[in-house]
Image (tube, rainbow, N blue to C red):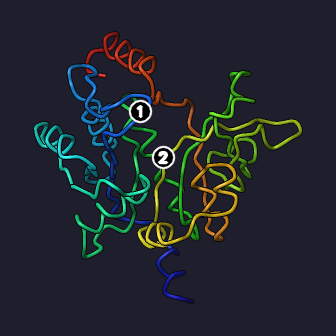
Amino acid sequence: MTARRDAQSGAPRNPLVVVPARLASTRLPNKPLAEIGGLPMIVQVLRRAEEAEIGPVIVACGDAAIAEAVAAAGGRAVMTRPDLPSGSDRVYEAVQLFDPDGAHDAIVNVQGDLPTIPPAAVRAVFEPLARPGVDIATIVAEITDPGERDDPAVVKAVLSLRPGERIGRALYFSRLAVPGGDGPLYHHIGLYAYRREALARFVALPPGILEQREKLEQLRALEAGMRIEAGLVDTVPLGVDTPADLARARAIFDASPGA
């Protein structure tokens, strides 16, 4: 058995949670610092990730202002190059800086624009890595709103998931309503957990043909033969991308102080 297979034969035991964030955003400039519930949004995400209690949490910062906000809240910030092409690259660079000796054997990537994410969802994205041979884990929720079926902004995950199961193998991701036929469709939620060596492999890969066609980074991993499995959760967390999303997030916190 190869060393790589040996590394993948058991469940990771020492995960590190990383929240990538940068100020540049075309639809909502400076959104990591937007105030929600009395705190910058990035700090709210940090708190939810800490509440998951699966490992230490760091924020991979593309800008000094984000690092300052995180440090002021007592969090751990790691400065990364501002010109990195993706959140995955930012996560990888922060991991290498924070843990150069490789003590953490799994990396959980929590998006920096999910201030209301349930801590249980962060735990759920880590769980599929317990299965032998899984390189990358993610989460999905069953689509119940008919309007989401044909919305290209809602990414669908094609899963091998039997009735009653909560974890299944991801075979494809698309902006189309796939697969065809009778049965549920699954809304992909863009959180990921990687075995440490899988993250290093992924960020070293060139962009994939299907990735460029669908504009979905996770297809790069599938094209390269990496195994992705997804855990099923009950709801899709609110992602803050627009002023309207920000208003919704603020309303949620106003209605539930301390959420």
User: In the image, 138: left or right of 248?
Assistant: right
Q: Secondary structure at mark 1?
A: loop
Residue at horizontal 43 percent and vertical 46 percent from the top: 123
The quarter of the picture where residue 144 lies is top right
Q: Nearer the viewer, residue 5 or 219?
A: 219
Q: How dense is the environment of label 2, judged by Cα within 10 Å: few (below 14), some, or many (20 and up)?
A: some
Using the image, determine if residue 111 lies above or below residue 209: above
Provide residue 174's location: percent of width, then percent of height.
70, 45
Residue at horizontal 70 percent and vertical 58 percent from the top: 210
Instruction: Name the residue type under label 2.
Output: Leu
The quarter of the picture where residue 188 lies is top right
Residue at horizontal 23 percent and vertical 29 percent from the top: 40
Q: Are marks 1 and 2 in contact (CB under 8 Å)?
A: yes
Q: Which residue is mark 2?
A: 191
Provide residue 195's location: percent of width, then percent of height.
45, 66
Q: Which residue is mark 1?
A: 117
Q: Secondary structure at mark 2?
A: strand
* C-alpha distance separating marks 1 and 2: 10 Å
User: In the image, 224: left or right of 182?
Assistant: left
